[in-house]
Image (tube, rainbow, N blue to C red):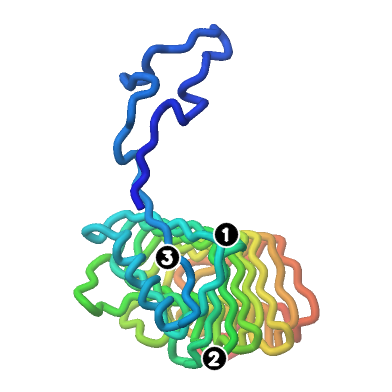
């Protein structure tokens, strides 16, 4: 779907100046009421189908259609419940935007512990806002962010953001969010940020970035809840990501809220709340505590 917006539809631009009471004839050379073509093109997801395989095909097609020459693209997700049984992939794109809501739910019924629900491969400066996923069977992760050099992908994955999102594993997902992990061939996944993301019900780690050497990983006011089955809230074992965790909370982890490995940058933990976990911090250096 393509949107064309007119100045008359934008009250802030088509109204009187609050200081002078004057309605300008033009704003930055644009006449009031004049159509501004292609001010922002966006695509809407197709309505949900009762068939999970149809949803996977439709969703992947919609994401591909929103991307032009590895650049841009805006997806607006309408309210609805999408059952999916295979991975939704966004690949080799810069500046992509996804806008969902908590009325848009992606339910995983794929029952494959080797597959993520969403795979972000070679994404650069992309934003995912309002992603709501729930697993009803085995999955690798809700979101995997990686570099795998497949399918002619050339962009270096970095500076991506997931925000205002809920990822519910219900004991079925191995990880909440994985940076690198299975299939990754290189690190170069720097400066990703997670803002107001609630991850729960994973069996291993909420945020997983082992041996990734990823700099500048920021979690702001996030929550990681093991619900008695998860081992770690954050796991960067080996030469892993550098983590800055600000605010937010951890709870109910069988091993530790944070297992932090070696990194070229400092780890910063500021104002985190912890409840009912075995320990708060595990500093593991290649198996040595």
Q: Would you name the residue on which mark 1 appears?
A: 101
Residue 132 horizontal side relative to residue 6, left or right: right
Up-down relation of residue 274 to residue 253 (above or below): above
Tags 1 and 3 touching, CB below 8 Å = no
Query: Closer to the camera: disc 2 or disc 1?
Result: 1
Q: Around disc 2, counting alpha carbons within 10 Å, would you say few (fewer than 14), some (14 to 19), or many (20 or more)? A: many
Q: Would you name the residue on which mark 2 appears?
A: 138
Marks 2 and 1, Cα distance to the nearest angstrom?
24 Å
Query: Which mark, residue 46?
Result: 3
Marks 1 and 3, Cα distance to the nearest angstrom?
15 Å
Q: Around disc 3, counting alpha carbons within 10 Å, would you say few (fewer than 14), some (14 to 19), or many (20 or more)? A: some
The quadrant in which the C terminus is found is bottom right
Q: Around disc 1, counting alpha carbons within 10 Å, would you say few (fewer than 14), some (14 to 19), or many (20 or more)? A: some
User: Residue 231 location, x and y as percent?
Assistant: 65, 87
Of the residues under marks 2 and 1, which one precedes in the sequence?
A: 1
At x 80% / y 81%, what residue is drawn?
276
Of the residues under marks 2 and 3, which one precedes in the sequence?
A: 3
């Amino acid at each position: 779907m393509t949107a064309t917006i007119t100045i008359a539809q934008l009250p802030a631009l088509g109204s009187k100046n609050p200081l002078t009471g004057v309605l300008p004839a033009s704003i930055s050379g644009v006449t009031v009421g004049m159509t501004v073509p292609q001010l922002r093109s966006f695509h809407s997801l197709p309505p949900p189908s009762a068939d999970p395989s149809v949803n996977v095909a439709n969703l992947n097609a919609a994401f591909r259609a929103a991307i032009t020459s590895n650049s841009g693209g805006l997806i607006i997700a309408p309210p609805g419940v999408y059952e999916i049984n295979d991975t939704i992939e966004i690949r080799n794109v810069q500046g992509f935007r996804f806008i969902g809501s908590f009325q848009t739910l992606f339910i995983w019924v794929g029952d494959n512990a080797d597959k993520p629900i969403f795979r972000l491969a070679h994404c650069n400066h992309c934003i995912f806002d309002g992603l709501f996923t729930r697993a009803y069977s085995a999955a690798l992760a809700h979101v995997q962010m990686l570099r795998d050099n497949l399918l002619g992908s050339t962009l270096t994955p970095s500076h991506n953001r997931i925000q205002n999102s809920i990822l519910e594993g219900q004991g079925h997902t191995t990880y909440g969010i994985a940076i690198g992990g299975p299939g990754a061939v290189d690190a170069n996944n720097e400066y990703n940020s997670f803002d107001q993301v609630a991850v729960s019900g994973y069996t291993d780690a909420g945020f997983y970035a082992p041996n990734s050497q990823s700099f500048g990983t920021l979690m702001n006011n996030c929550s990681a809840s093991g619900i008695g089955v998860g081992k770690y809230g954050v796991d960067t074992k080996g030469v892993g990501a550098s983590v800055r965790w600000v605010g937010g909370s951890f709870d109910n982890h069988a091993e530790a809220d944070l297992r932090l490995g070696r990194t070229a940058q400092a780890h910063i933990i500021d104002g985190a709340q912890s409840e009912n976990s075995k320990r708060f911090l595990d500093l593991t250096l290649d198996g040595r505590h």
